[in-house]
Image (cartoon, helix red, strand yellow):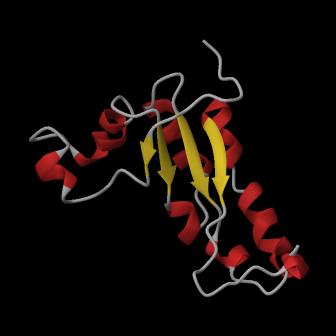
Amino acid sequence: MSRKAGDIHIGVGGWTYARWRESFYPAGLPHKRELEYASRKLTSIEINATYYRTQSAANFTKWRDETPEHFIFSVKAPRFALMRKTATEADESIERFFNSEVIELGDKLGPILWQFPPTKTFDSEFF
């Protein structure tokens, strides 16, 4: 089965939540297996860590390999790019993000989430 336009995925923002260890994850599940477990209950999970820091190719490869074949990740764009006054000022951060080996997710790379800070208002000049 291949992905196509219009596919709907059900997911959450992240997978490492202490409270889930009491309610969602089976008792005794090692923390390192939480993504593996969650990815078999959902069809998509957001990688929030990319918002805060650049991730290694090894991380992206590990996440890709721990998830089922038709699973996808949404990936949050880095905050450093989103807090700039203009898109031109964000160029370096955006380039660093796309050169961070995010491509290692392969077919599991889904949408990129551009979460602007709540203080940012729409400005057509930004783009």
User: The N terminus lies in which quarter of the figure?
Assistant: top right
Q: Is residue 117 left or right of residue 49?
A: right
Out of 106 and 9, give the one closest to the viewer: 9
Q: Residue furthest top?
A: 1
Q: Position of residue 122 (x, y in %)?
A: 75, 79
Coordinates of residue 95 in the picture (x, y in percent) = 81, 63
Q: Please state which of residues 42 and 47 is positioned toward the viewer in this rendering.
A: 42
The residue lying at 21 percent from left, 52 percent from top is 20
Query: Would residue 41 appear left or right of 106 to someone viewing this image?
Result: left
> Above or below — where is 30 with respect to 89?
above
Q: Residue at x 66, y 46 (%)?
A: 111
Count of marks, rendered view: 0
Give the image location of residue 52, x and y in percent. Answer: 54, 71
The image shows residue 57, relative to residue 4, as above or below, that is below
User: Is 62 left or right of 5, judged from the image as shown?
Assistant: left
Q: Quadrant of residue 98?
A: bottom right
Q: Position of residue 59 (x, y in %)?
A: 52, 48
Point 44% across, 54% down: residue: 13
Q: Quadrant of the C terminus?
A: bottom right
